[in-house]
Image (cartoon, rainbow, N blue to C red):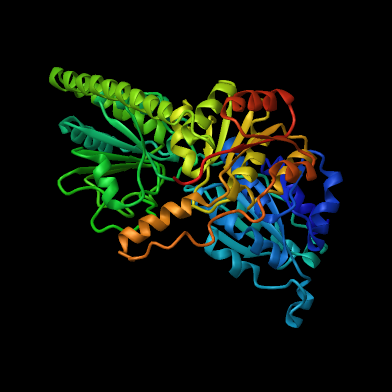
Amino acid sequence: MRGRRVLMDSFVSHGVRHIFGNPGTTETPLLDSLPAFPQLEYIMALHEGVAVSAASFYAQASGRVTVANLHVAPGLGNGIGSLYGALKANSPVVVTAGQQDTRMRLNSPVLGHDLVAMATPVTKWSVQIERADEIAPIMRRAFKVATDGPQGPVFVALPIDVMEQETTVDASAPDNLWRSTRPDPAGVEALAALLLKSKKPAIIAGDDVAISGGEQALVALVETIGATVWFEGLRHHAPFPTSHPSYRQSLPADARQVRQALGDSDLVLLIGGPFFEDIWFAPGVHIAGGVSLLQIEASAERLALNNRLDAGMVGDIAVSLHLLTEALRAKAGADFEQAAQSRNAALADLQAKEKEAYRARVEKSWNRQPSSMPRVTAELRRGLPDNVVIVDESITASLDLARAFDYRGFGDYFGGRGGGIGQGLAGAIGVKVAIPDRPVVAVSGDGSAMYAIQALWTAAHHRLAIVFVVLANREYRILKHNVDVWRQNFEAGTQHPYQSMDITGPVLDFVHLAAGMGVEAVRVEKAEDIAGAVAKAVAAGRPYLVEIAIEGKR
């Protein structure tokens, strides 16, 4: 059999259902094989970055490993930024790229380069297949490495001549692997003992809580000990119900602000994340001296990697949280239970006050023109159904978006990790493919949208009913905020106008951009029209873009 047949059989045997790709000449062996494999759907993108982000978000939303198919050196280069995002998100994606004929490699052929070296820094494993006999074992290993915890992308280069070689080495069945680790009872006891001593515990919940299905187990633990819950600043999921009184918000972007946010907490429990991914340097540590620091991770790689721990434990996240709660309830005395109840009551009071303060903020900005971010997100909430899935790249509007929407747990919210923009519109493609029965709404800034605007064509081409909401303030607002922080942190001593951060002259017209790619669109100038516009877009049952005029930096 030919190598390309082994490749396709490998995809099928490992449960791949979709290939997200941008085709090229060296991908001909794969593309020409598709008719013989109707169980594989090729989701076509017009840019490699869109294909990789869509695959990454699909893997996050479905919990399944998937494939992204790119094209030689420039194509892989186009996808590197999105591949970095997939690495930071721990998305199990097998990324392939066609490679030039190996018989030409000494002649530096057009589009040829060292693809393995290009992909190595942003993948868990990067390899080129050199002969057809290697296809089956390398693909088996690629899927294994991609799904080993922490999960992440793997890259495989596929020379076009190798795909046409004959081989007798057939695709192998997937490995039957049970990776969940039951936590050590001694670790459970150690963590429980420290938590029982705490007077003001705080929890920082990472994406792995949601991925493991541990949201309700975390709720039980939080209510047992009366803890506050914080999210990472950049996250892919909502690992805890955001309407719960214990939920605080996302952590800020430097160590000093993190210490301030955690306040007088005497214990911090880190669960299922890399912790901490700062934007700015600030002197000192994230967790103040004298504060007990605990950690639970699904694999040992992250445990105590960046922070010295008083106790740390490896184990399946959901199981670990359940066992820890059981141990606490078995050992807690009346005094501890009363103190926890008192903390829970205080957090409920705090939540009520914060909601009232936010309502006042919304009211204060209600009639501003162009529309304020609090008003816009409130109107979005009013117009969208309760089962909406939000794909968020609103950036400077994200705090207001989080206030307006209640995320109950896995599947309600998807965001990008790594800090690179352009993931939102592309990511919504993967989310909709993974969750076809729920309305999917991507909320993006106008600057971010232009990084992956080709995603609109893919949505139209595959008839994906996604509502793309573009918040158009005609500026890179986040960069202006960052300039302000830079000037303060480094005492720059300048007050120049912001340089090259306005998206004007000419002004972007997203209605016409969308129409050119087959997507119906509308621009909304007045806040009172937002709810009706997004409700109509969802009801249309097809790709739809709503451009909303929103205020710039004030």
Image coords of residue 34 (percent x, y): 83, 47
- Count of numbered marks: 0
In front of the other: 173 or 389: 389
Find the residue positioned furthest to the bottom. 107
The answer to whether 356 is drawn above or below residue 6 in the figure is above
The residue sitting at 18% across, 43% down in the picture is 291
Find the residue positioned furthest to the left. 335
The answer to whether 116 is drawn above or below residue 520 in the figure is below
Which quadrant holds the C terminus? top left
Image coords of residue 21 (percent x, y): 73, 51
Q: Quadrant of residue 181?
A: top left
The residue sitting at 63% across, 43% down in the picture is 425
Q: Quadrant of residue 512?
A: top right
The answer to whether 369 is drawn above or below residue 299 in the figure is above
The residue sitting at 66% across, 44% down in the picture is 14
Image coords of residue 39 (percent x, y): 78, 38
The residue sitting at 52% across, 45% down in the picture is 416
* In the displayed structure image, the side of residue 395 where residue 315 appears, left or right: left
